[in-house]
Amino acid sequence: MRRDKEPPPKKRSPAYYWWTLANVVALCLAVLSWLLCLHVFNHPEIPRNYELLKKLKRVEPPEDLPEMEAPPGDSADPRAFYRRYAGLSSDELAQFNAALMRNYLTNLKEPKLIQYAEGNYRVEQVRPLGPDDLFHPGFAVRGRAMIAPDEFSKPAPWPVVIEYLFPTDNPEASGWIAPSDLLSVAKFPNCAMLLHVSRLENEDTPVVCLTVVPIAFGTFKAGKDRQFDLKAPAELNPAAPLPAFPLEQEE
């Protein structure tokens, strides 16, 4: 009779193989988790990271600083801002804006990034801020920089636009600043910090748009006889679109 041959038994991996494999997998997961944590904590300007940090209760709203305790920082008028940012590429602006937002969300841990806006701006638009904006309640003012070429000339429009975001719970305050008004901005007492830079390419001259927010809070004088209180935002929304006004409106 012909006897069928039995197949040889399969070789089993030694115990230390599985032990080594399990340790390698665990090490990879630990490194991946560590890198993910670093990414989340180091980049709160990314909206999904910020939402995760909120769930972990690791975010803090802007500090309610009085004007006299505003951190030191550079200041610039529209001409200086234009020289700095009109020639940057889109990638350079994106990196710079991410750094500005990250600094704002972490309560100004990078003081070298603080730049205060100055200058005179002719108001073009005013609108209230809502849940889809960086913060609310409050309102936003958009204005065109007005520059006098020399001491003998009248101020003329400059290719710089400012968006000033005012955090306030006074519902009437947005009506106290109207189109054609002159908005005067100074390092003190306004403490309006640069938060975002946009650029609109025109056929002739690029237009630079500056979004600024106050980082110290007191009263803001609107006109000759009105003023309203500024309050530190209770919550921030880094997913809000910036600039706050569509650039396509600029001509």
Image: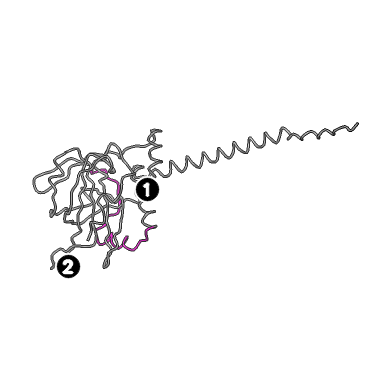
Q: State the residue in front, 175 or 148.
A: 175
In this rendering, the answer to whether 55 lies above or below 77 is: above
Residue for badge 1: 110
In this rendering, the answer to whether 48 lies above or below 95 is: above
Residue 96: name its quadrant: bottom left
At label 2, the amino acid type is Asp
At label 1, the amino acid type is Glu
Q: Which residues are magenta?
A: 67-90
Disc 2 is placed on an element classified as loop
Disc 1 is placed on an element classified as loop
Residue at image x 30%, y 59%? 199
Looking at this rendering, what residue extends furthest in the front direction?
1
Q: Residues within 10 Å of mark 1 (few under 14, many from 20)?
A: few
Residue 145: name its quadrant: bottom left
Residue 195 highlighted magenta (yes or no): no
Q: State the residue in front, 182 or 199.
A: 199
Q: Is residue 55 left or right of residue 78?
A: right
What is the C-alpha distance between the residues marked 1 and 2? 36 Å
Residue for badge 2: 150
Q: State the residue in front, 236 or 48.
A: 48
Say how many tags the image has. 2
